[in-house]
Image: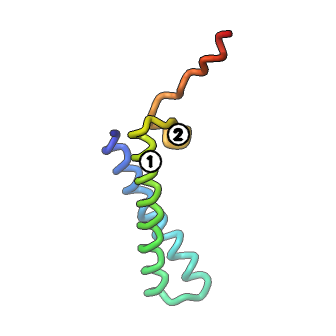
Amino acid sequence: MPIKKWLLQYLIAWPSLVLILGGVQYLKGRDIVYSTQFGLLWATLSLAVFAITRAYNFRKNVYCAVCNDLPQPSDSNSGS
């Protein structure tokens, strides 16, 4: 599994999601403490679900065009 690649991606995505999700709550009029907690919680949960799904698909050898972790499968019908 490409652990280093995934960790780098999540180290970039997590703070970005915290800022976006927390910022939206703050702009909606919530206080800063609630907005920060909301951003931390939902960014963590969202990335956890994505990471678990990504690891599962990688182990099952399921191709994902967005993830780009496995080589694209060749179409066996294109030669006929």
* Left or right of residue 24: residue 37: left
Residue at 56 percent of width and 80 percent of height: 25
Give the farthest residue toward the front.
Answer: 60
- CB atoms of marks 2 and 1 within 8 Å: yes
Q: Which mark is residue 54?
A: 1
Residue at 51 percent of width and 35 percent of height: 63
| Residue 52 higher or lower than 77, as above or below | below
Element type at mark 2: loop
Give the farthest residue toward the left.
Answer: 4
Quadrant of the rendering where the N terminus is positioned: top left
Residue at 60 percent of width and 21 percent of height: 75
Quadrant of the rendering where the C terminus is positioned: top right
In percent of width and height, residue 7 lies at 34, 50
Give the residue number, with chain letter if any, for mark 2.
64
**Which amino acid, by three-letter code, is at mark 1?**
Arg
Q: Residues within 10 Å of mark 1 (few under 14, many from 20)?
A: some
**Which amino acid, by three-letter code, is at mark 2?**
Cys
Residue at 47 percent of width and 86 percent of height: 34
In percent of width and height, residue 50 lies at 46, 55
